[in-house]
Image: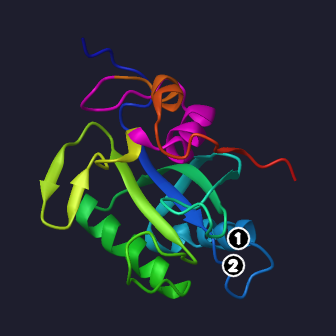
Amino acid sequence: MNKSNRYDDAVIVALGSNVKGGYASCSALLGAAVEGFPEIGLTVVKRSSWWRSSAWPDPAGPDYVNAVALVETTLAPSALLAALLDIEAAFGRRRGLANAPRTLDLDLIAFGRLLVNVPGLTVPHPRAQDRRFVMGPLAEIAPSWRHPLTQQTAAALAALASIGVEASPCHR
């Protein structure tokens, strides 16, 4: 059953940081990144609060600050991904080891109901539904959003997430 709702056309970007770089905090770095979204053609419609989660898969690493933003754009999915990678680089992100600490991580979670599976780009994000640090913030701002493949809501997926189950809103 595919019930239409107001989030069907949502473009969803997840944000994360566990290295503050030259900023006062990881949340300040993420805030600066979001403020730069209009420069790449993204209009932020709604943003979750900041969430904190343990580093994964090694919780001994620095905690992450995470959020999710609903955005509007005229960019195609591949162009949007390229722009997000450019922002990451501008904030000092250096790609190396998988799951290593990072200044900025921007993931394209969904692009409306679009399904994309080409080299370098899979939409919806193939692991987002398993991550509470993505689904929790998304459920906060768009609880009735439905995953394009499973049709489960963000609220249901947040409750079922198996990675980052300790993720919760920051209270500072």
Coordinates of residue 109 in the picture (x, y in percent): 38, 50
Q: Is residue 109 above or below residue 157?
A: below
The residue where tag 1 is placed is 26
Q: Is residue 172 above or below residue 10?
A: below
Coordinates of residue 74 in the picture (x, y in percent): 34, 58
Q: Is residue 161 above or below residue 108?
A: above
Front position in the image: 170 or 146? 170
The residue where tag 2 is placed is 20
Q: In the picture provided, is 140 more to the left or to the right than 124?
A: right
Q: Is residue 70 above or below residue 15?
A: above
Q: Residue furthest left?
A: 118
Q: Residue furthest right?
A: 172
Q: Residue furthest top?
A: 1
Q: In the picture provided, is 113 more to the left or to the right than 142?
A: left
- Given the image, on which type of amino acid does mark 1 rest? Cys
Q: CA distance from mark 2 to mark 1?
A: 4 Å
- Given the image, on which type of amino acid does mark 2 rest? Lys
Asked if the residues shown at circle 2 and circle 1 are in contact, with their CB atoms under 8 angstroms apart, the answer is: yes
Mark 2 surroundings: few (<14), some (14-19) or many (≥20) residues within 10 A: many
Front position in the image: 62 or 137? 62
Query: Residue, x 28% and y 69% (percent of image)?
Result: 79
Coordinates of residue 88 in the picture (x, y in percent): 48, 78
Name the element at disc 1.
helix
Q: In the picture provided, is 3 more to the left or to the right than 136?
A: left
Mark 1 surroundings: few (<14), some (14-19) or many (≥20) residues within 10 A: many
Query: Residue, x 34% and y 31% (percent of image)?
Result: 147
